[in-house]
Image (spheres, coloured by chain):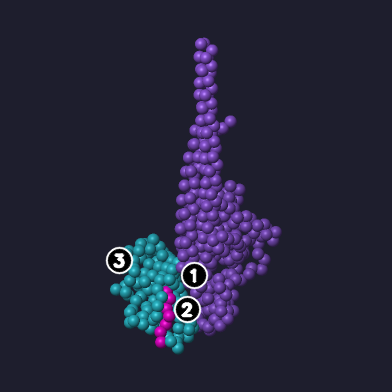
Chain colours: A cyan, B purple
Amino acid sequence: MADHLEVALVAAERTVWQGQAKIVIARTTDGDVGILPGHAPLLGLLQGGSVQVRTVDGEYFVAAAPDGFISVANDRVSILAENAEMGHDIDLEEARRELEEALAAGLADADADEVRLAEARVRAAEQTS
Amino acid sequence: MPANLRELRDRKASVSTIKKLTRAMELIAASRIVKAQQRAQAAGPYARELTRAVSAVATFSNVDHPLTTEKPNPKRAAVLLITSDRGQAGAYSANVIREGERLNQLLREDEKAIVPYISGRKGIAYYTFRQRDIAQSWSGDSDAPSFARAREMADALIEAFLTPTEEGGVDEIHIVFTRFVSMLTQRPDVIRLLPLEVVEGEEAPAADDVLPLYEFEPSAEEVLDGLLPKYVASRIHYCMLQAAASELANRQRAMKSATDNAQDLIESLTRDLNQARQAQITQEISEIVGGASALADASAGSE
C-alpha cells in the first residue's frame, strides 16, 4: 500500500490538477468523507461542490467541483466535474457577484444549475482565502 | 486565332488571387487540426474516467435505469446529424448527410418515424431546402465545439428520450458523425446513443485491469442517475470533437487540391499568353516586312 494518493481533478475539457496527496476531503450527498491512502473503492456524487486536498508537500488547497463525482480505487482518486476549478484561481468578489446575479435571475428556482455553480465557486474561493 | 491578350492576362491574375486564397485556407485548416487534436486529447481523461465509473456501476448493480432500458416497441427515432458550419471542405458535409439519409432509410423500413436534430449550418440548410421539419438545431461552433454545447444537446436529447412516445418523445437516439481515423481517412459513422450501451473507451481495458468492488454513495441507483446524463454529454462531445477534426482535415485536403488546380491553370494560361504574345509579334514583324518590301517595289518601279 502506498503512503499517498494519486489525485486527478478533471474538468470536461482539461485536467485541472494532478498530483500526490495525503488526504482528500469531499462532501458527498451523505456528508463529508475524508479519503486517506488505502481507502476502499468508492463512487460518490459530490454535493456543494468543494473538495479539499492536502498534498504530500503539506500544501493545502480547495477546488470547486460543482455537480461532480468522485471515484476512489487503488489509491487513485479522480474528481470529475464539468467545470472544475482551483479555489485560488477564482476571484472571490467576482464569484459573489455572479452568485447574486444567478440568485436574482432564478429567484424561484434555488436549485438551478447556475446558482449551484456560483455557490460552489464562492465556497471554494472563501475557503481558500 | 489566339485569344485576346488582355483577356488572358485578366484571367491569369484572377486565378492567382484564387490560389492565394485557397492556399491561406489550407494553412489555416492545417494549423487548426493540431488544435482540434489537442482538444480531443484534453477531453480524453474525463471521458475515460466517466466510462470507467459508468461501467463499474453497470457491472456491479442490476439497476434498471430509464436511459439504459430498451423500449419494447420503438416507434420514433431521433437522429442527431453532425455537419459543418462552413463549406470549402470538399465532400465532408455531403458524405455525412448521405450517411444520415441511409440511416433514415433503414429506420423508415423498420417503420419508425424520424425526428431530426441537426448540428451545423450545412445540415440545417440541407433540411430547410427540402422543407423537412427539424426538431432542434445548433450551429456556430462546428470546428471548435465546447463542452457546454455538448451538454446543451445532451439535455435536449435526454428530455426527448424521457418523454413518452405519445407526447412527442422518442424511443431511440442515433448520432451520425464523421470519425477521424487519420489525417488521410475520415469515415462517416453511426452510433446509437440511447438506450445506452456502455462501451469501454477507445482502448480495450488490459486483462489484469479488473474493476474494483466499489461502494456507492449514496446508492448505486442515485450514482447512476447522476452519471448517465454526464456520460451522454461526454459521448456527444466526443462525437463533435471527432467531427471537428474531420472537418478540418477535409478542408485542408480540399483546399490543397484547389491550390494545385489553380497552379495548373496558371501554368496553362501562361503558356497561352506567351503563345498569343508571340503570335502578335510575329504578325507585326511580317506586316512591317511586307510594308517595307511593298515600298521598295514601288520605288524600284518608279525609277
Q: Chain of mark 2?
A: A
User: What whole-number distance in Å separates the C-alpha atoms at marks 1 and 3?
Assistant: 33 Å
Left or right, A95 with reference to B148: left
Which amino acid, mark 1?
Gly
Q: How far across and down, in percent of the image, does residue B170 sit? A: 60, 62
Number of the label disc, if any, that sits on residue A71: 2
Measured along the vertical axis of the image, is residue B26 above or below residue B41? above
Specify few, some or many for label 2: CA neighbours under 10 Å numbering under 14, 14-19, or 20 or more. Answer: many
Within the magenta stretch, is there residue B282? no
Along the polypeptide, which appears first: circle 3 or circle 2?
Answer: 2
What residue is at 55 percent from the left and 46 percent from the top?
B264
Q: Report the residue at 59% width, 70% height from top.
A: B196
Which-is-in-front pick, marks 1 and 3?
A: 1
In the rendered structure, which segment of residues is drawn in magenta? A3-9
Q: Which residue is under mark 3?
A: A93
Q: Is residue A20 left or right of residue B223?
A: left
Eye-nearest disc, 3 or 2? 2
Q: Nearer the viewer, residue B175 or B22?
A: B22
Is there any visible trace of residue B282 in the rendered image? Answer: yes
How busy is the neighbourhood of tag 1: few (under 14 within 10 Å), some, or many (20 plus)? many
- Give the residue number, with chain letter if any, for mark 1: B44
Tell me the crowding category of disc 3: few under 14, some 14 to 19, or many 20 or more residues within 10 angstroms, Cα based.
few
* Residue nearest the viewer, comparing B98 with B113: B98
Examine the image and state in which quarter residue B116 appears. bottom right
Given the image, on which type of amino acid does mark 2 rest?
Ser
